[in-house]
Image (spheres, helix red, strand yellow):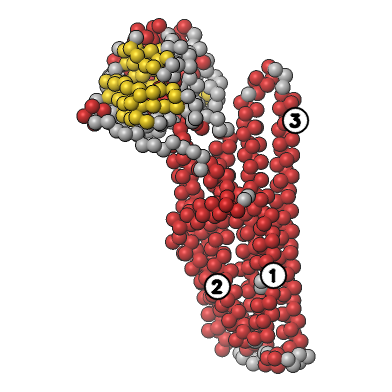
Protein backbone atom coordinates (compact mmCIF):
# COMPACT_ATOMS: atom_id res chain seq x y z
CA UNK A 1 0.00 0.00 0.00
CA UNK A 2 1.49 3.36 -1.07
CA UNK A 3 2.18 6.03 1.55
CA UNK A 4 -0.66 8.40 0.46
CA UNK A 5 -3.12 5.52 0.50
CA UNK A 6 -1.89 4.39 3.93
CA UNK A 7 -2.27 7.95 5.23
CA UNK A 8 -5.87 8.07 3.99
CA UNK A 9 -6.68 4.81 5.74
CA UNK A 10 -5.12 6.04 8.97
CA UNK A 11 -7.06 9.29 8.72
CA UNK A 12 -10.29 7.36 8.19
CA UNK A 13 -9.57 5.13 11.20
CA UNK A 14 -8.78 8.24 13.25
CA UNK A 15 -12.13 9.70 12.26
CA UNK A 16 -13.88 6.57 13.50
CA UNK A 17 -11.88 6.77 16.73
CA UNK A 18 -12.93 10.39 17.35
CA UNK A 19 -16.59 9.39 17.30
CA UNK A 20 -15.88 6.75 19.98
CA UNK A 21 -13.33 8.68 22.00
CA UNK A 22 -15.23 8.45 25.29
CA UNK A 23 -15.28 4.65 25.12
CA UNK A 24 -11.60 4.54 24.23
CA UNK A 25 -10.82 6.83 27.18
CA UNK A 26 -12.95 4.67 29.49
CA UNK A 27 -11.13 1.55 28.27
CA UNK A 28 -7.75 3.15 28.97
CA UNK A 29 -8.79 4.34 32.45
CA UNK A 30 -10.06 0.86 33.33
CA UNK A 31 -6.78 -0.61 32.05
CA UNK A 32 -4.77 1.88 34.12
CA UNK A 33 -6.81 0.94 37.19
CA UNK A 34 -6.06 -2.76 36.58
CA UNK A 35 -2.36 -1.98 35.99
CA UNK A 36 -1.96 0.07 39.14
CA UNK A 37 -3.78 -2.62 41.12
CA UNK A 38 -1.29 -5.13 39.73
CA UNK A 39 1.64 -3.00 40.95
CA UNK A 40 0.08 -2.72 44.40
CA UNK A 41 -0.56 -6.48 44.39
CA UNK A 42 3.14 -7.17 43.71
CA UNK A 43 4.20 -4.73 46.44
CA UNK A 44 1.93 -6.42 49.00
CA UNK A 45 3.03 -9.88 47.89
CA UNK A 46 6.74 -9.01 48.19
CA UNK A 47 6.12 -7.36 51.57
CA UNK A 48 4.29 -10.42 52.90
CA UNK A 49 7.10 -12.76 51.83
CA UNK A 50 9.76 -10.45 53.27
CA UNK A 51 7.93 -10.12 56.58
CA UNK A 52 7.30 -13.86 56.81
CA UNK A 53 10.78 -15.08 55.77
CA UNK A 54 13.16 -12.37 56.97
CA UNK A 55 11.34 -10.58 59.79
CA UNK A 56 9.58 -13.75 61.09
CA UNK A 57 6.38 -11.77 61.61
CA UNK A 58 3.46 -13.88 62.91
CA UNK A 59 0.70 -14.59 60.45
CA UNK A 60 -1.88 -13.00 62.77
CA UNK A 61 -0.13 -9.64 62.44
CA UNK A 62 -0.15 -9.93 58.66
CA UNK A 63 -3.93 -10.40 58.43
CA UNK A 64 -4.61 -6.75 57.43
CA UNK A 65 -2.07 -7.09 54.60
CA UNK A 66 -3.74 -10.31 53.42
CA UNK A 67 -7.12 -8.54 53.40
CA UNK A 68 -5.59 -5.63 51.48
CA UNK A 69 -4.15 -8.12 48.98
CA UNK A 70 -7.58 -9.71 48.45
CA UNK A 71 -9.12 -6.24 47.99
CA UNK A 72 -6.51 -5.33 45.40
CA UNK A 73 -7.17 -8.59 43.54
CA UNK A 74 -10.88 -7.72 43.42
CA UNK A 75 -10.08 -4.21 42.16
CA UNK A 76 -7.75 -5.64 39.51
CA UNK A 77 -10.40 -8.09 38.32
CA UNK A 78 -13.02 -5.33 38.23
CA UNK A 79 -10.67 -3.12 36.21
CA UNK A 80 -10.00 -5.89 33.69
CA UNK A 81 -13.72 -6.62 33.41
CA UNK A 82 -14.56 -2.96 32.84
CA UNK A 83 -11.74 -2.68 30.31
CA UNK A 84 -13.19 -5.57 28.31
CA UNK A 85 -16.71 -4.16 28.54
CA UNK A 86 -15.75 -0.63 27.49
CA UNK A 87 -13.59 -2.01 24.65
CA UNK A 88 -16.54 -4.01 23.35
CA UNK A 89 -18.79 -0.93 23.45
CA UNK A 90 -16.15 1.09 21.59
CA UNK A 91 -15.77 -1.58 18.92
CA UNK A 92 -19.54 -1.89 18.56
CA UNK A 93 -19.95 1.83 17.95
CA UNK A 94 -17.06 1.96 15.49
CA UNK A 95 -18.39 -0.97 13.48
CA UNK A 96 -21.85 0.61 13.48
CA UNK A 97 -20.36 3.87 12.14
CA UNK A 98 -18.40 2.02 9.45
CA UNK A 99 -21.48 0.10 8.33
CA UNK A 100 -23.50 3.33 8.35
CA UNK A 101 -20.94 4.87 5.99
CA UNK A 102 -21.13 1.84 3.71
CA UNK A 103 -24.93 1.95 3.78
CA UNK A 104 -24.99 5.66 2.88
CA UNK A 105 -22.55 5.01 0.05
CA UNK A 106 -24.58 2.10 -1.32
CA UNK A 107 -27.72 4.20 -1.12
CA UNK A 108 -26.06 7.12 -2.90
CA UNK A 109 -24.57 4.82 -5.53
CA UNK A 110 -27.88 3.11 -6.19
CA UNK A 111 -28.66 -0.41 -7.39
CA UNK A 112 -27.97 0.49 -11.02
CA UNK A 113 -24.33 1.46 -10.41
CA UNK A 114 -23.84 -1.39 -7.94
CA UNK A 115 -25.10 -3.97 -10.42
CA UNK A 116 -21.58 -4.60 -11.74
CA UNK A 117 -20.20 -5.27 -8.24
CA UNK A 118 -20.27 -8.82 -6.94
CA UNK A 119 -22.76 -9.36 -4.13
CA UNK A 120 -20.15 -11.53 -2.41
CA UNK A 121 -17.65 -8.63 -2.38
CA UNK A 122 -20.24 -6.31 -0.88
CA UNK A 123 -21.14 -8.92 1.72
CA UNK A 124 -17.46 -9.42 2.62
CA UNK A 125 -17.01 -5.68 3.08
CA UNK A 126 -20.13 -5.44 5.24
CA UNK A 127 -19.31 -8.46 7.39
CA UNK A 128 -15.64 -9.55 7.47
CA UNK A 129 -13.95 -6.26 6.59
CA UNK A 130 -15.90 -4.30 9.18
CA UNK A 131 -15.43 -7.05 11.78
CA UNK A 132 -11.66 -6.81 11.18
CA UNK A 133 -11.80 -3.33 12.75
CA UNK A 134 -12.77 -4.84 16.11
CA UNK A 135 -9.29 -5.80 17.30
CA UNK A 136 -7.79 -2.42 16.37
CA UNK A 137 -10.27 -0.34 18.38
CA UNK A 138 -11.01 -2.81 21.19
CA UNK A 139 -7.44 -3.95 21.84
CA UNK A 140 -4.63 -2.20 19.95
CA UNK A 141 -5.66 1.44 20.28
CA UNK A 142 -6.23 1.40 24.09
CA UNK A 143 -3.14 -0.80 24.55
CA UNK A 144 -0.95 1.86 22.89
CA UNK A 145 -1.63 4.19 25.83
CA UNK A 146 -1.45 1.42 28.42
CA UNK A 147 1.93 0.26 27.06
CA UNK A 148 3.31 3.70 27.96
CA UNK A 149 1.52 4.49 31.24
CA UNK A 150 1.94 1.15 33.04
CA UNK A 151 5.65 0.56 32.19
CA UNK A 152 6.44 4.17 33.21
CA UNK A 153 4.75 3.67 36.58
CA UNK A 154 6.70 0.43 37.11
CA UNK A 155 9.91 2.07 35.93
CA UNK A 156 9.57 4.90 38.47
CA UNK A 157 9.10 2.37 41.28
CA UNK A 158 12.04 0.19 40.11
CA UNK A 159 14.36 3.23 39.86
CA UNK A 160 13.35 4.13 43.41
CA UNK A 161 14.21 0.60 44.55
CA UNK A 162 17.38 0.10 42.46
CA UNK A 163 18.49 2.48 39.72
CA UNK A 164 20.76 -0.13 38.08
CA UNK A 165 17.83 -2.51 37.63
CA UNK A 166 15.88 0.41 36.18
CA UNK A 167 18.63 0.98 33.61
CA UNK A 168 18.42 -2.69 32.56
CA UNK A 169 14.68 -2.24 31.90
CA UNK A 170 15.21 1.03 30.02
CA UNK A 171 17.83 -0.52 27.73
CA UNK A 172 15.79 -3.64 26.93
CA UNK A 173 12.35 -2.03 26.50
CA UNK A 174 12.96 -0.38 23.06
CA UNK A 175 13.78 -3.74 21.47
CA UNK A 176 10.10 -4.78 21.47
CA UNK A 177 8.71 -1.66 19.67
CA UNK A 178 11.62 -1.86 17.22
CA UNK A 179 10.79 -5.41 16.18
CA UNK A 180 7.08 -4.57 16.15
CA UNK A 181 7.75 -1.87 13.55
CA UNK A 182 9.93 -4.18 11.45
CA UNK A 183 7.31 -6.92 11.48
CA UNK A 184 4.50 -4.47 10.83
CA UNK A 185 5.98 -3.34 7.52
CA UNK A 186 5.30 -6.75 6.01
CA UNK A 187 2.17 -7.58 8.01
CA UNK A 188 0.14 -4.65 6.62
CA UNK A 189 0.80 -5.63 3.01
CA UNK A 190 0.05 -9.30 3.69
CA UNK A 191 -3.25 -8.47 5.40
CA UNK A 192 -4.34 -6.28 2.50
CA UNK A 193 -3.49 -9.07 0.04
CA UNK A 194 -5.45 -11.45 2.29
CA UNK A 195 -8.60 -9.30 2.13
CA UNK A 196 -8.29 -8.71 -1.62
CA UNK A 197 -7.82 -12.43 -2.31
CA UNK A 198 -10.73 -13.57 -0.17
CA UNK A 199 -13.02 -10.93 -1.73
CA UNK A 200 -12.19 -12.19 -5.23
CA UNK A 201 -12.60 -15.80 -4.12
CA UNK A 202 -16.00 -15.06 -2.56
CA UNK A 203 -17.22 -13.32 -5.70
CA UNK A 204 -16.05 -16.09 -8.00
CA UNK A 205 -17.53 -18.82 -5.79
CA UNK A 206 -20.92 -17.07 -5.68
CA UNK A 207 -20.90 -16.53 -9.46
CA UNK A 208 -20.09 -20.19 -10.07
CA UNK A 209 -22.86 -21.38 -7.73
CA UNK A 210 -25.43 -19.08 -9.32
CA UNK A 211 -24.42 -20.15 -12.82
CA UNK A 212 -24.06 -23.85 -12.00
CA UNK A 213 -26.89 -24.88 -14.31
CA UNK A 214 -25.37 -22.96 -17.23
CA UNK A 215 -21.93 -24.42 -16.53
CA UNK A 216 -23.41 -27.93 -16.56
CA UNK A 217 -25.25 -27.33 -19.84
CA UNK A 218 -22.03 -26.20 -21.55
CA UNK A 219 -19.82 -28.80 -19.84
CA UNK A 220 -17.68 -26.23 -18.05
CA UNK A 221 -18.06 -27.47 -14.46
CA UNK A 222 -14.61 -29.06 -14.40
CA UNK A 223 -12.94 -25.88 -15.66
CA UNK A 224 -14.83 -23.84 -13.08
CA UNK A 225 -13.71 -26.26 -10.35
CA UNK A 226 -10.08 -25.89 -11.42
CA UNK A 227 -10.40 -22.10 -11.30
CA UNK A 228 -11.84 -22.19 -7.80
CA UNK A 229 -9.17 -24.65 -6.74
CA UNK A 230 -6.41 -22.35 -8.00
CA UNK A 231 -7.95 -19.32 -6.26
CA UNK A 232 -8.40 -21.31 -3.03
CA UNK A 233 -4.76 -22.40 -3.12
CA UNK A 234 -3.71 -18.78 -3.60
CA UNK A 235 -5.80 -17.82 -0.57
CA UNK A 236 -4.19 -20.66 1.42
CA UNK A 237 -0.70 -19.39 0.60
CA UNK A 238 -1.54 -15.81 1.62
CA UNK A 239 -3.08 -17.07 4.87
CA UNK A 240 -0.02 -19.19 5.67
CA UNK A 241 2.29 -16.23 4.99
CA UNK A 242 0.25 -14.10 7.40
CA UNK A 243 0.37 -16.79 10.09
CA UNK A 244 4.11 -17.25 9.55
CA UNK A 245 4.75 -13.56 10.18
CA UNK A 246 2.52 -13.64 13.25
CA UNK A 247 4.18 -16.67 14.82
CA UNK A 248 7.70 -15.50 13.96
CA UNK A 249 7.17 -12.03 15.40
CA UNK A 250 5.64 -13.43 18.59
CA UNK A 251 8.56 -15.81 19.05
CA UNK A 252 11.15 -13.04 18.58
CA UNK A 253 9.39 -10.67 20.96
CA UNK A 254 8.95 -13.35 23.63
CA UNK A 255 12.65 -14.20 23.29
CA UNK A 256 13.85 -10.67 23.93
CA UNK A 257 11.45 -10.17 26.85
CA UNK A 258 12.58 -13.46 28.40
CA UNK A 259 16.28 -12.59 27.96
CA UNK A 260 15.77 -9.20 29.60
CA UNK A 261 13.98 -10.75 32.59
CA UNK A 262 16.70 -13.42 32.89
CA UNK A 263 19.49 -10.79 32.93
CA UNK A 264 17.61 -8.88 35.60
CA UNK A 265 17.16 -12.07 37.67
CA UNK A 266 20.89 -12.82 37.43
CA UNK A 267 21.69 -9.31 38.65
CA UNK A 268 19.25 -9.58 41.58
CA UNK A 269 20.48 -13.05 42.53
CA UNK A 270 24.18 -12.21 42.48
CA UNK A 271 23.47 -8.92 44.22
CA UNK A 272 21.67 -10.62 47.11
CA UNK A 273 24.51 -13.16 47.39
CA UNK A 274 27.03 -10.32 47.61
CA UNK A 275 28.93 -11.14 44.40
CA UNK A 276 28.16 -7.73 42.90
CA UNK A 277 29.35 -4.63 44.72
CA UNK A 278 28.76 -2.09 41.97
CA UNK A 279 26.15 0.63 42.45
CA UNK A 280 23.16 0.02 44.72
CA UNK A 281 23.45 -3.79 44.64
CA UNK A 282 24.72 -3.97 48.23
CA UNK A 283 21.48 -2.31 49.38
CA UNK A 284 19.25 -5.01 47.89
CA UNK A 285 16.92 -6.80 50.29
CA UNK A 286 14.56 -9.70 49.80
CA UNK A 287 11.69 -7.21 49.58
CA UNK A 288 13.28 -4.94 46.97
CA UNK A 289 14.86 -7.77 44.96
CA UNK A 290 11.71 -9.88 44.93
CA UNK A 291 9.53 -6.86 44.08
CA UNK A 292 11.77 -5.99 41.12
CA UNK A 293 11.58 -9.58 39.87
CA UNK A 294 7.80 -9.60 40.25
CA UNK A 295 7.47 -6.26 38.46
CA UNK A 296 9.81 -7.14 35.58
CA UNK A 297 7.29 -9.41 33.74
CA UNK A 298 4.56 -6.82 34.38
CA UNK A 299 6.84 -4.15 32.89
CA UNK A 300 7.10 -6.10 29.64
CA UNK A 301 3.52 -7.43 29.66
CA UNK A 302 1.84 -4.28 28.22
CA UNK A 303 4.49 -4.16 25.47
CA UNK A 304 4.07 -7.88 24.74
CA UNK A 305 0.30 -7.46 24.67
CA UNK A 306 0.70 -4.53 22.27
CA UNK A 307 2.90 -6.66 20.02
CA UNK A 308 0.26 -9.41 20.02
CA UNK A 309 -2.39 -6.86 19.01
CA UNK A 310 -0.13 -5.28 16.41
CA UNK A 311 -1.57 -7.71 13.90
CA UNK A 312 -5.02 -6.30 14.72
CA UNK A 313 -3.65 -2.99 13.48
CA UNK A 314 -2.35 -4.60 10.29
CA UNK A 315 -5.70 -6.33 9.75
CA UNK A 316 -7.58 -3.06 10.31
CA UNK A 317 -5.35 -1.22 7.84
CA UNK A 318 -5.85 -3.94 5.25
CA UNK A 319 -9.62 -4.04 5.75
CA UNK A 320 -9.80 -0.25 5.96
CA UNK A 321 -8.04 0.07 2.60
CA UNK A 322 -10.72 -2.12 0.99
CA UNK A 323 -13.60 -0.28 2.69
CA UNK A 324 -12.14 3.14 1.88
CA UNK A 325 -11.67 2.15 -1.76
CA UNK A 326 -15.39 1.42 -1.87
CA UNK A 327 -16.33 4.67 -0.10
CA UNK A 328 -14.14 6.72 -2.45
CA UNK A 329 -15.76 5.37 -5.59
CA UNK A 330 -17.25 8.31 -7.45
CA UNK A 331 -20.91 8.88 -6.74
CA UNK A 332 -23.02 11.61 -8.24
CA UNK A 333 -24.41 13.23 -5.11
CA UNK A 334 -25.91 16.25 -6.88
CA UNK A 335 -29.02 17.34 -5.07
CA UNK A 336 -31.98 17.79 -7.43
CA UNK A 337 -33.41 21.29 -7.63
CA UNK A 338 -36.89 21.01 -6.27
CA UNK A 339 -39.67 22.61 -8.23
CA UNK A 340 -42.48 24.63 -6.72
CA UNK A 341 -44.18 22.45 -4.11
CA UNK A 342 -47.57 23.80 -5.05
CA UNK A 343 -47.20 21.82 -8.27
CA UNK A 344 -44.93 18.93 -7.29
CA UNK A 345 -46.90 17.74 -4.28
CA UNK A 346 -49.79 16.85 -6.55
CA UNK A 347 -47.83 14.19 -8.39
CA UNK A 348 -44.56 13.59 -10.19
CA UNK A 349 -42.62 16.33 -11.93
CA UNK A 350 -39.53 16.07 -14.10
CA UNK A 351 -38.15 19.49 -15.06
CA UNK A 352 -35.31 20.14 -17.49
CA UNK A 353 -33.56 16.86 -16.75
CA UNK A 354 -30.34 15.99 -18.54
CA UNK A 355 -28.98 12.49 -17.88
CA UNK A 356 -26.03 10.41 -18.98
CA UNK A 357 -24.06 7.45 -17.61
CA UNK A 358 -20.53 8.54 -16.80
CA UNK A 359 -18.83 9.99 -19.86
CA UNK A 360 -21.25 8.27 -22.23
CA UNK A 361 -23.73 9.92 -24.61
CA UNK A 362 -26.66 11.96 -23.33
CA UNK A 363 -29.71 9.76 -22.70
CA UNK A 364 -32.21 12.51 -21.86
CA UNK A 365 -31.73 16.17 -22.69
CA UNK A 366 -33.90 18.88 -21.08
CA UNK A 367 -36.68 16.37 -20.34
CA UNK A 368 -40.01 17.66 -18.95
CA UNK A 369 -42.82 15.37 -17.75
CA UNK A 370 -45.82 15.94 -15.48
CA UNK A 371 -47.69 12.98 -13.98
CA UNK A 372 -50.75 13.51 -11.80
CA UNK A 373 -51.27 11.54 -8.61
CA UNK A 374 -53.40 8.45 -9.21
CA UNK A 375 -52.60 8.25 -12.92
CA UNK A 376 -51.58 5.02 -14.65
CA UNK A 377 -48.69 5.71 -17.03
CA UNK A 378 -47.39 3.21 -19.56
CA UNK A 379 -43.92 3.64 -21.07
CA UNK A 380 -43.45 1.96 -24.43
CA UNK A 381 -41.04 2.11 -27.30
CA UNK A 382 -38.17 0.10 -28.80
CA UNK A 383 -35.75 -1.77 -26.56
CA UNK A 384 -32.84 0.41 -25.42
CA UNK A 385 -34.87 3.57 -25.84
CA UNK A 386 -34.59 4.57 -22.17
CA UNK A 387 -37.73 3.16 -20.51
CA UNK A 388 -35.87 1.41 -17.69
CA UNK A 389 -33.61 4.46 -17.26
CA UNK A 390 -36.66 6.68 -16.80
CA UNK A 391 -38.02 4.30 -14.14
CA UNK A 392 -34.63 4.31 -12.38
CA UNK A 393 -34.74 8.12 -12.41
CA UNK A 394 -38.19 8.18 -10.77
CA UNK A 395 -37.01 5.62 -8.19
CA UNK A 396 -33.96 7.71 -7.27
CA UNK A 397 -31.57 4.94 -8.31
CA UNK A 398 -29.70 7.44 -10.50
CA UNK A 399 -29.30 11.22 -10.30
CA UNK A 400 -29.63 13.61 -13.24
CA UNK A 401 -26.71 15.66 -14.46
CA UNK A 402 -28.97 18.72 -14.52
CA UNK A 403 -32.58 19.52 -13.80
CA UNK A 404 -34.92 18.38 -11.04
CA UNK A 405 -37.14 15.42 -10.20
CA UNK A 406 -39.91 15.63 -7.60
CA UNK A 407 -42.10 12.75 -6.42
CA UNK A 408 -45.06 14.01 -4.38
CA UNK A 409 -43.02 17.00 -3.25
CA UNK A 410 -39.95 14.99 -2.23
CA UNK A 411 -36.70 13.91 -3.87
CA UNK A 412 -37.00 10.48 -5.56
CA UNK A 413 -36.49 7.65 -3.10
CA UNK A 414 -37.25 9.75 0.00
CA UNK A 415 -40.73 8.27 0.27
CA UNK A 416 -41.42 4.51 0.20
CA UNK A 417 -42.53 3.18 -3.17
CA UNK A 418 -43.24 -0.18 -4.75
CA UNK A 419 -40.74 -1.60 -7.25
CA UNK A 420 -41.07 -4.66 -9.45
CA UNK A 421 -38.04 -5.16 -11.68
CA UNK A 422 -37.48 -7.64 -14.46
CA UNK A 423 -35.63 -9.86 -12.02
CA UNK A 424 -37.30 -10.64 -8.71
CA UNK A 425 -35.64 -10.90 -5.33
CA UNK A 426 -36.33 -13.74 -2.93
CA UNK A 427 -34.67 -15.20 0.13
CA UNK A 428 -34.37 -18.77 1.34
CA UNK A 429 -37.49 -19.08 3.49
CA UNK A 430 -41.28 -19.17 3.43
CA UNK A 431 -43.67 -17.15 1.33
CA UNK A 432 -44.65 -15.20 4.43
CA UNK A 433 -41.01 -14.37 5.24
CA UNK A 434 -40.47 -13.12 1.70
CA UNK A 435 -43.53 -10.86 1.90
CA UNK A 436 -42.53 -9.52 5.30
CA UNK A 437 -39.29 -8.14 3.83
CA UNK A 438 -41.19 -4.93 3.08
CA UNK A 439 -43.84 -5.16 5.83
CA UNK A 440 -42.32 -6.89 8.88
CA UNK A 441 -45.43 -6.49 11.05
CA UNK A 442 -47.88 -7.93 8.48
CA UNK A 443 -50.32 -10.51 9.87
CA UNK A 444 -50.90 -13.93 8.30
CA UNK A 445 -54.40 -12.79 7.29
CA UNK A 446 -53.02 -9.74 5.46
CA UNK A 447 -50.40 -11.91 3.70
CA UNK A 448 -53.03 -14.43 2.62
CA UNK A 449 -55.21 -11.59 1.27
CA UNK A 450 -52.30 -10.09 -0.70
CA UNK A 451 -51.49 -13.48 -2.26
CA UNK A 452 -55.10 -13.93 -3.36
CA UNK A 453 -55.09 -10.43 -4.89
CA UNK A 454 -52.39 -11.58 -7.32
CA UNK A 455 -54.07 -14.89 -8.15
CA UNK A 456 -52.07 -17.19 -5.89
CA UNK A 457 -55.06 -18.20 -3.77
CA UNK A 458 -55.51 -21.65 -5.33
CA UNK A 459 -51.79 -22.36 -5.03
CA UNK A 460 -51.84 -21.37 -1.33
CA UNK A 461 -54.81 -23.69 -0.72
CA UNK A 462 -53.07 -26.56 -2.49
CA UNK A 463 -49.96 -26.37 -0.29
CA UNK A 464 -50.02 -28.19 3.03
CA UNK A 465 -48.09 -25.37 4.71
CA UNK A 466 -50.03 -22.56 3.02
CA UNK A 467 -48.26 -19.22 3.28
CA UNK A 468 -45.53 -20.98 5.25
CA UNK A 469 -44.47 -23.04 2.23
CA UNK A 470 -40.78 -22.69 1.50
CA UNK A 471 -38.95 -21.44 -1.58
CA UNK A 472 -35.26 -21.14 -2.41
CA UNK A 473 -33.23 -18.01 -3.05
CA UNK A 474 -33.76 -18.25 -6.81
CA UNK A 475 -37.50 -18.84 -6.49
CA UNK A 476 -37.12 -22.61 -6.75
CA UNK A 477 -40.47 -24.22 -5.98
CA UNK A 478 -42.45 -21.69 -8.04
CA UNK A 479 -42.84 -21.14 -11.76
CA UNK A 480 -41.58 -17.89 -13.28
CA UNK A 481 -45.08 -16.40 -13.33
CA UNK A 482 -45.83 -17.49 -9.77
CA UNK A 483 -42.58 -16.02 -8.51
CA UNK A 484 -43.32 -12.71 -10.28
CA UNK A 485 -46.78 -12.62 -8.71
CA UNK A 486 -45.28 -13.37 -5.30
CA UNK A 487 -43.11 -10.26 -5.72
CA UNK A 488 -46.17 -8.26 -6.77
CA UNK A 489 -47.97 -9.42 -3.60
CA UNK A 490 -45.39 -7.46 -1.57
CA UNK A 491 -46.67 -4.28 -3.21
CA UNK A 492 -50.27 -5.11 -2.27
CA UNK A 493 -49.20 -5.83 1.27
CA UNK A 494 -47.12 -2.65 1.71
CA UNK A 495 -49.77 -0.27 0.28
CA UNK A 496 -47.40 2.16 -1.47
CA UNK A 497 -48.76 5.37 -3.09
CA UNK A 498 -46.31 5.03 -6.03
CA UNK A 499 -45.62 1.78 -7.88
CA UNK A 500 -42.94 1.41 -10.56
CA UNK A 501 -42.84 -1.73 -12.70
CA UNK A 502 -40.27 -2.67 -15.34
CA UNK A 503 -41.77 -5.06 -17.93
CA UNK A 504 -44.10 -6.76 -15.39
CA UNK A 505 -45.34 -9.36 -17.93
CA UNK A 506 -42.06 -10.08 -19.74
CA UNK A 507 -41.37 -13.79 -20.19
CA UNK A 508 -44.62 -14.94 -18.58
CA UNK A 509 -47.15 -17.46 -19.83
CA UNK A 510 -50.67 -16.38 -20.81
CA UNK A 511 -52.20 -17.42 -17.47
CA UNK A 512 -49.71 -15.44 -15.42
CA UNK A 513 -50.16 -12.42 -17.70
CA UNK A 514 -53.90 -12.41 -16.99
CA UNK A 515 -53.32 -12.49 -13.23
CA UNK A 516 -50.76 -9.66 -13.46
CA UNK A 517 -53.19 -7.56 -15.51
CA UNK A 518 -55.98 -8.11 -13.02
CA UNK A 519 -53.70 -7.25 -10.11
CA UNK A 520 -52.51 -4.02 -11.75
CA UNK A 521 -56.10 -3.10 -12.55
CA UNK A 522 -57.00 -3.49 -8.86
CA UNK A 523 -54.07 -1.26 -7.90
CA UNK A 524 -55.12 1.42 -10.40
CA UNK A 525 -58.68 1.40 -9.08
CA UNK A 526 -57.39 1.88 -5.52
CA UNK A 527 -55.95 5.28 -6.49
CA UNK A 528 -52.28 4.30 -6.71
CA UNK A 529 -49.94 6.05 -9.10
CA UNK A 530 -48.63 3.40 -11.49
CA UNK A 531 -45.76 3.86 -13.94
CA UNK A 532 -44.69 0.80 -15.91
CA UNK A 533 -42.73 -0.05 -19.04
CA UNK A 534 -44.19 -2.58 -21.42
CA UNK A 535 -44.65 -3.80 -24.98
CA UNK A 536 -47.81 -5.69 -24.03
CA UNK A 537 -50.91 -4.34 -25.78
CA UNK A 538 -53.28 -5.35 -22.96
CA UNK A 539 -51.18 -3.41 -20.45
CA UNK A 540 -51.24 -0.35 -22.71
CA UNK A 541 -55.04 -0.35 -22.65
CA UNK A 542 -54.90 -0.32 -18.86
CA UNK A 543 -53.04 3.01 -18.87
CA UNK A 544 -54.59 6.46 -18.60
CA UNK A 545 -51.67 7.81 -20.58
CA UNK A 546 -49.13 6.16 -22.86
CA UNK A 547 -45.67 7.70 -23.32
CA UNK A 548 -43.39 6.63 -26.16
CA UNK A 549 -39.72 6.62 -25.09
CA UNK A 550 -37.23 6.51 -27.97
CA UNK A 551 -33.70 7.92 -28.41
CA UNK A 552 -33.96 10.25 -25.43
CA UNK A 553 -37.34 11.66 -26.41
CA UNK A 554 -40.53 11.13 -24.41
CA UNK A 555 -43.84 12.00 -26.08
CA UNK A 556 -47.49 11.09 -25.76
CA UNK A 557 -48.69 8.29 -28.01
Inspect this view and state whether residue 211 appears. Answer: yes
Q: In which quarter of the image is residue 536?
A: top left
Q: Do the residues labelled 1 and 3 touch (CB within 8 Å)?
A: no
Residue 175 is tagged as 1
Residue on which the image places disc 3: 226
Of labels 3 and 2, earlier in sequence is 2
In the rendered structure, are the residues bearing label 3 and label 2 in contact, judged by CB atoms less than 8 Å apart? no
When asked about the image quadrant of residue 398, the answer is top left
**457 to the left or right of 268:** left
Left or right: 77, with 344 as reference point:
right
- Judge depth for marks 1 and 3 and give the one in front: 1
> Residue 290, image x and y in percent?
67, 83
As rendered, which of 265 and 472 lies closer to the eye? Answer: 265
Above or below, 520 relative to 270: above
Identity of the residue drawn at 54% across and 67% down: 145
| Residue 322 location (% of width, % of height) | 57, 44
Q: Which residue lies furthest to the left in this view?
A: 342
Name the residue beneath numbered marker 2: 149
Q: Can residue 316 be seen in this view?
A: no
Determine the residue located farthest toward the right in the rendered image. 275
Amino acid sequence: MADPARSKVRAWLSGLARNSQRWITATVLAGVLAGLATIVQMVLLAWLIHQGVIEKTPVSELTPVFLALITVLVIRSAGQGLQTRFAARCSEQVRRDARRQLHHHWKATGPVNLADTSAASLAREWLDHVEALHGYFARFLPQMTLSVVIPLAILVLVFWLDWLAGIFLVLSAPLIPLFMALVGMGAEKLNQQHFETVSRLSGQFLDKVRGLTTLQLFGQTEAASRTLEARSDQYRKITMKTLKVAFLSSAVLEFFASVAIAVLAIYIGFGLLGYIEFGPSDELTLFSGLLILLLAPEFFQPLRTLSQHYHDRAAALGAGAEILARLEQSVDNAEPIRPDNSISNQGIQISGVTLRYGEGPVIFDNLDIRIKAGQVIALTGPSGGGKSTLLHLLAGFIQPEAGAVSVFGEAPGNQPFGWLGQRGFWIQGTWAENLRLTTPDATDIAIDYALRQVGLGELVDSRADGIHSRIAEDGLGLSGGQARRLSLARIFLADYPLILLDEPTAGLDATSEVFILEALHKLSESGKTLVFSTHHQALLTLADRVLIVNDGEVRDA
